[in-house]
Image (spheres, rainbow, N blue to C red):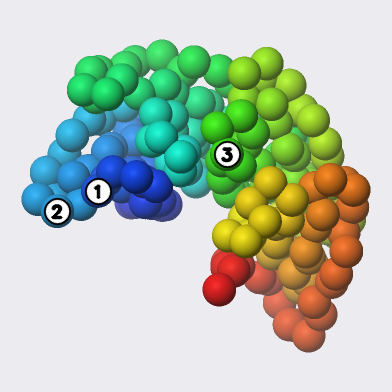
Amino acid sequence: FGKVYAMHWAGVRAELISASQDGKLIIWNAKSTNKILAIPLRSSWVMTCAYEQTSDDMVACGGLDNLCSIYKLTPDRAPTNRAEKELAAHDGYLSCCRFVGKDKLLTASGDSTCIMWDVERGDPISTFTDHAGDVMSLAISPSAPTQTFVSGSCDSNSKVWDAREKRCVMTFTGHESDINSVAFF
């Protein structure tokens, strides 16, 4: 069995997704705890997963293959075996991914960057390069979801980014080691 490495709640439905190093993404009914759908992955070395938050019709995952794979979901959660898109531009593992609305996705990587992607085209929109170590975590601002996000890195810094200006607007220092998780409150 593989360990569960990540999970993320759906935005609308009472569902969550888990990513395990057994090579599967599993969508769960959060009320009954029953499996709804298991999605087999090309690589079992998955480290992150994300649920699209506005209509719950896409999920994404990534890991040591340096790719972010996006899967479209049907309303009845019919089986899917192929990624709709595979986003490739990072030179290191994917540690975190989060949807930004329906049309964008943000990824964090061991290559010290974050990339904002156009989901439909599968192309990078912006690359955020101010970290000096692996970027381990992302969080999207709930009050300005298309504009602001925060990242945590192995460079011991957390940074707030303005996606419109494509730059870091604030750096939080003080940790003496890796920042593995960040969140907005």
Pointer 3 or 2: first along the chain:
2
Q: Residue at x 69, y 26 (%)?
A: 118
Up/down of 176 relative to 42, above or below: below
Q: Nearer the viewer, residue 75 or 128?
A: 75
Neighbour class for label 1 at 10 Å: few (<14), some, many (≥20)?
A: few
Q: Position of residue 173 (x, y in %)?
A: 81, 80
The amino acid beneath tag 2 is Lys
Residue beneath disc 2: 31
Q: CA distance from mark 1 to mark 3?
A: 18 Å
85 horizontally vs 50: left or right: right
Q: Which mark is residue 14?
A: 1
Neighbour class for label 2 at 10 Å: few (<14), some, many (≥20)?
A: few
Q: Residue at x 20, y 52 (%)?
A: 30
Q: CA distance from mark 1 to mark 2?
A: 7 Å
- Secondary structure, mark 1, is loop
Residue beneath disc 3: 101
The amino acid beneath tag 1 is Ala
Q: Residue at x 39, y 29 (%)?
A: 57
Q: CA distance from mark 3 to mark 2?
A: 25 Å
